[in-house]
Image: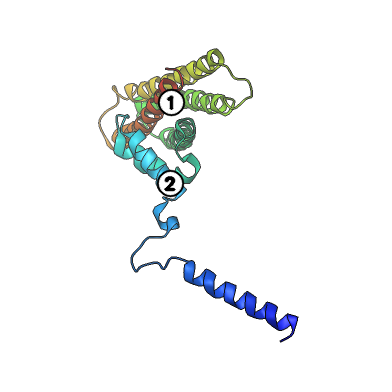
Amino acid sequence: MNTQHRLFLVSLVLQILLFQLQPTPTVGDPTPAALAPTPKTNGTEFIRTSCGTTLYPDLCYHSLSRYASAVQQSPGQLAKVAIGVTLSKARRMATYVSTLIRQAEYGTDRRAAAALHDCFTNFGDAVDEIRGSLKQMGQLGAAGLGVDSFRFQMSNVQTWMSAALTDEDTCTDGFEGVADGSLKSDVCDRVMKVHKITSNALALVNSYVAKETP
């Protein structure tokens, strides 16, 4: 038997021994990959739990759960995403009111037209405040950010988000003198939906601040 043939036999024997030493999985035993939850699952459950601290938890979860992969289990990222969603909703509302204004200008209900103009102004302010909050959140990752700086920046976010809530309330207040009808109910219902999302975002911001500054 030549040397090459001997090496082949030794290699074959070693492979057989290694195969026999490996544990044989039983039917139904989960693999390690199956036991480990996916990042999206982690994020989804984290969002569900975090939304429990808001006034409208179901709305909070349904509006944010699609961003689970981006949020993971980060309170700061969740607050940032919530503000971003709020900004999108507020912008859409401002655009919608702007469309109604053009229609109302051809009508005879001056009170409704005035209320729409005021609402558009209020939502313009709200959009600016929410946009400022989102920009401030984007600056939190700066190197060397101390506790005092963090508190200062987050206090700005809290103040602006609270101001946005006030502006949204002011919009609906302007319709108190408007006769009941489809226009009034439609605008107020839509504003209330944006208001709830804004409220949830502020609650998540407050929760984030509480966790980071014990």
Instruction: Work out whether residue 190 can be spotted.
Output: no
The residue wearing badge 1 is 208
Dot 1 falls on a residue whose secondary structure is: helix
Reading the chain from its start, which is encountered first: label 2 or label 1? 2
Q: Is residue 120 left or right of residue 179?
A: right
Q: Is residue 124 left or right of residue 53?
A: right
The residue wearing badge 2 is 66
Q: CA distance from mark 2 to mark 1?
A: 20 Å
- How far from the left and from the top, in percent, is residue 45? 36, 42
- How far from the left and from the top, in percent, is residue 186? 32, 37
50 lies above or below 68: above
As shown in the figure, which amino acid type bears the numbered disc 2? Arg
- What residue is drawn where x is 47% and y is 66%? 22
24 lies above or below 31: below
As shown in the figure, which amino acid type bears the numbered disc 1? Tyr
- How far from the left and from the top, in percent, is residue 50? 36, 34
